[in-house]
Amino acid sequence: MSILLKSGTLVNEGETFIGSVLIEGEKIIGIYRENETLPEAKEVIDLTGKYIFPGIIDDQVHFREPGLTKKADIYTESRAAVAGGITSFMEMPNTVPNALTVDLLEDKYDIAAEKSIANYSFYMGASNDNIKELLKVDSKKVCGLKVFMGSSTGNMLVDNENTLRSIFSECSMLIASHCEDEDTIRANTAKFKAMYGNDISMKYHSHIRSEEACYRSSSFAAGLANEYGAHLHILHLTTEKELSLFDSDKPLKDKTLTAEACVHHLWFSEEDYGLFGTKIKWNPAVKKASDRDALMKAVINNKIDVVATDHAPHTAKEKSLDYWRAPSGGPLVQHALVSMLEHVSNGKITLEKVIEKMCHAPSDLFKVEKRGYLKPGFFADITVVDLASEWEVSKNNILYKCGWSPFEGRKFKSKILGTWVNGSIVYDNLKGNEIGEIVESNSSMRLTFSA
């Protein structure tokens, strides 16, 4: 089956130009610029005035399966992901049971092979006592190792310095880390409980999970990476202070210390706690507006390498609890790209930089094979967007299993019109309706990685 995506505006490798993309089977086989002779194709889709992007690669999600499927599962959240233009995801190991052995990790791949609409990979989880399992992982088939240097689910808080030194010195794979200093958080928690008891305002979340908690952990992890020459990828940065750890001058291919920002930390600030309450309770916490603005600047100047979601849904009932009991995390994959495109519309970042940080850089950083670019020979993971089609997030068009979004009531100027995974359309909204159709084509694949 050959498909020609005709006369759209391509955004790829720093260029924006009118062109067409020829798909045959699972791959892109041709890119044609305006005025070049176009080939024949079995199906031609005219995308005049619309934008063609490489499919978004999200390097941090929590899809909750196995064990926490009342909140979400791989099927429901991958559906929401492709509706948001995300064609590939990398999912975290703090499910139940925690993915702390190779066998448990492979169980998740088996589930995804049956259920996922998008391409998938899963991190192997580290604990204080599973170094032998970490060393068994095949780096060509698994995106990386995840180390929680801050509180997490089950047996996944790695707080033993000797264990951390073993991981950083012995493991050759990319190490992705959640960095918050647990001792600092515990001390802050005791302090605020003593002051306010159970009746505490959400506004203190960023004081409990503070700048100092983040910096102490991030700087310690960066020090270990530098000492042992490990590739450390620090997830979801939230503070301006942490940015001093990273280099904006080196090209990504030469970095061994890399960083991620998440869409919610580029959108919200602690000034929003009064309006949104626990709906925007995340770990690490949303912090000052000045931190948010510094993060955006760091995305632009390349101190921060990728933009992702940390999609982590909980039920509406759970999120409605008081501050101490409400879990941290929220659903984001369906609205991540459109939120970043809103920043483009508002002049805060260029379209080319968004595609770099959400498509090209994740591919390069993780060495994903043949994805993240619009290139002949690459898999046809493609997202089509209308940058001038306003719509409002509502219960009627939310696809998350949890049924809510921190963006409810928000109007976005851009709309996802179509998402292709390995040459098959999996989200069809080419008519520009309120919500499109999920096409379950069984086209998703396990991501693979070059050495």
Image (cartoon, rainbow, N blue to C red):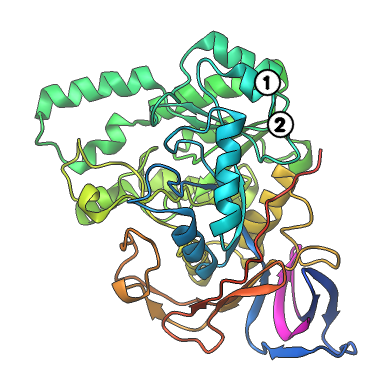
Q: Amino acid at mark 1?
A: Asn
Looking at the rendered image, the quarter that the N terminus falls into is bottom right
Specify the segment rendered in magenta. Answer: 1-18
Residue 423: give x, y in percent of width and height: 72, 72
Residue 299: give x, y in percent of width and height: 58, 50
Which of the 4 image quadrants contains residue 39?
bottom right
Residue 230: give x, y in percent of width and height: 70, 24
Q: Name the residue tied to disc 1.
A: 226
Task: Kindly identify the residue that appears in the image at 76 percent across and 39 percent down.
Answer: 140
Note whether residue 18 is visible: yes
Note whether residue 123 is visible: no
The chief SS type of the magenta part is: strand
Looking at the rendered image, the quarter that the C terminus falls into is top right
Marks 2/1 in contact by CB < 8 Å: the verdict is: yes
Secondary-structure class at tag 1: helix
Q: Amino acid at mark 2?
A: Thr
Q: Name the residue tied to disc 2.
A: 256
When the figure is inspected, residue 189 is found, relative to residue 407, above or below; the finding is above
Query: Which is nearer the eye, 396 or 342?
Result: 396
When the figure is inspected, residue 327 is found, relative to residue 362, above or below; the finding is above
Q: Is residue 417 left or right of residue 396?
A: right
